[in-house]
Image: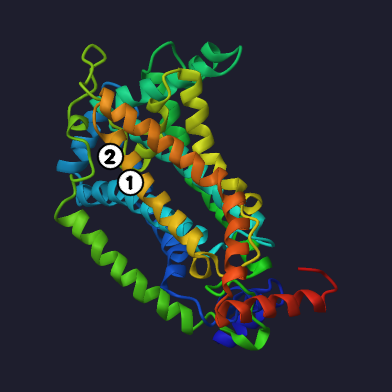
């Protein structure tokens, strides 16, 4: 009966061939490490956020006089409402953590290089969509930090040339953050995850077109690839188990650890918090915004701090495969960049002082310098490695790349 049903479907829709080509039999490099698990984890968290968000929306009221109380109703009166709310709140942080690690792995191994530029750019588009969704969702609890955070961020759009004031009014739906803002942010927050799902499909199509990268940095021959199932499904499930254990610790034992205490107070437009703090995943970019004394310059710097990642395929001109694994200077630069991001995060968390602003300005210069120095350091590093004599492993990788390119009639 099962075979007859599958045959009936296959005659009308390529179900079996799709599963074989894109899921179970998808050819995967055999040397992938656990750092490649985070793409799967991002997809899992996306589904988790969509499911919990749908159930939360059934009880949420997008009204300035009811929204805060509706959150309390979900927490106190709805069966397992507290669990849904904490899963969704912690899921947002988990989503950004997984995405940031996924991006860090790509940067470390140089997986953004040709022919994977489009794959990298679709990932950057997903990051922007995720940031927009998280920002709009942050307003929905209608707490003190939600209200004033939305007020500050929407006010930044006044930096738009010629039409700044009109853009701010269009975003808010009113002259101030109010009921119209809450209603449209709730609608868009509900809509954007489905747009993200569509963008994820585009991202996966790009991935399956150019195939997965691997730690060596060289595309393996067909006989060196293995089917995705069962080898990597088991690996992904193992990573998922570890992730769920850590995620459960936050949900069940420290659910308020990443929620700003001021957001448990109803929004009051007449009382400004002492210090406005965004969610932790926005802190480095918030610190860059504050490090520039001019509002227009700060907005431009903050926008460039996100968009500049898209230029990495053209900034990194090194011909050495394997990313930081085979490039000692780039490896040091990568770890310094991660340290700089942490410094920016701490600066963004604490109230602005003369000392913290100075540290933020230095860290901002180091942030952009990390990208702008990549073309220069790539060439210096390549000449230095060749002069010192590359390791046999790196030489073998370069020779392999030369061989593959020569077969296609190209030049290294």
The residue labelled by disc 2 is 346
Seen at 41% across and 19% down, the residue is 293
Q: Is residue 277 left or right of residue 111?
A: left
Residue 365: image quadrant is top left
* Residue nearer the viewer, 297 or 187: 297
Q: Which residue is mark 1?
A: 342
Q: SS of the residue at dot 2?
A: helix
Q: Label 2: few (<14), some or many (≥20) within 10 Å?
A: some
The percent coordinates of residue 273 (x first, y second) are 21, 21
Q: Is residue 139 above or below residue 25?
A: above
Give the image location of residue 120, x and y in percent.
59, 55
Residue 222 visible in rendering: yes
In the image, is 46 to the left or to the right of 27? Answer: left
Q: Residue furthest front?
A: 387
Circles 2 and 1: CB atoms closer than 8 Å = yes
Mark 1, secondary structure of its residue: helix
Residue 182 seen in the figure: no
- Figure coloring: rainbow
* Image position, residue 232 (x, y; %): 47, 79
Say the numbered circle drawn on residue 366. none
Image: 185 above or below 207: above
How crowded is the residue under tag 1: few (<14 C-alpha within 10 Å), some, or many (20+)?
A: some
Image point (38%, 75%), residue name: 237
């Amino acid at each position: 009966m099962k075979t007859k049903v599958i045959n009936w479907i296959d005659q009308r829709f390529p179900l079996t061939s799709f599963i074989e080509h894109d899921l179970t039999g998808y050819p995967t490099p055999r040397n992938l490490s656990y750092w490649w698990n985070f793409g799967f984890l991002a997809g899992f968290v996306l589904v988790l956020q969509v499911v919990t968000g749908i159930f939360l929306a059934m009880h949420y009221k997008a009204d300035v006089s009811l929204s805060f109380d509706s959150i309390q109703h979900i927490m106190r009166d709805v069966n397992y409402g507290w669990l849904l709310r904490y899963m969704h709140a912690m899921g947002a942080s988990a989503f950004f953590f997984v995405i940031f690690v996924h991006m860090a792995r790509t940067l470390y191994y140089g997986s953004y290089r040709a022919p994977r530029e489009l794959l990298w750019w679709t990932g950057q588009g997903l990051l922007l969509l995720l940031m927009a969704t998280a920002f709009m969702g942050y307003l929905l609890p209608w707490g003190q930090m939600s209200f004033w955070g939305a007020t500050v961020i929407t006010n930044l759009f006044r930096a738009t040339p010629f039409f700044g004031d009109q853009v701010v009014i269009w975003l808010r739906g009113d002259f101030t953050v109010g009921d119209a803002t809450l209603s449209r942010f709730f609608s868009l927050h509900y809509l954007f995850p489905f747009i993200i799902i569509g963008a994820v499909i585009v991202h996966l199509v790009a991935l399956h077109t150019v195939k997965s990268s691997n730690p060596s940095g060289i595309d393996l021959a067909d006989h060196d690839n293995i089917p995705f199932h069962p080898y990597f499904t088991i690996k992904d499930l193992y990573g998922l188990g570890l992730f769920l254990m850590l995620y459960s610790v936050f949900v069940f034992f420290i659910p308020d650890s990443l929620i700003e205490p001021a957001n448990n107070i109803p929004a009051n437009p007449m009382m400004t918090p002492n210090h406005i703090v965004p969610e932790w995943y926005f802190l480095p970019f918030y610190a860059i915004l504050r490090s520039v004394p001019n509002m227009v310059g700060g907005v431009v710097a903050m926008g460039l701090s996100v968009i500049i990642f898209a230029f990495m395929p053209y900034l990194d001109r090194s011909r050495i495969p394997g990313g930081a694994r085979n490039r000692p200077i780039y490896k040091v630069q990568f770890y310094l960049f991660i340290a700089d991001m942490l410094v920016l995060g701490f600066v963004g968390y604490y109230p602005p002082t003369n000392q913290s602003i100075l540290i933020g300005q230095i860290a901002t210069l180091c942030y952009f310098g990390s990208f702008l120095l990549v073309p220069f350091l790539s060439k210096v590093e390549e000449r230095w490695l060749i002069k010192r004599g590359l390791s046999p492993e790196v030489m073998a990788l370069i020779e392999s790349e030369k061989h593959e390119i020569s077969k296609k009639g190209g030049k290294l």
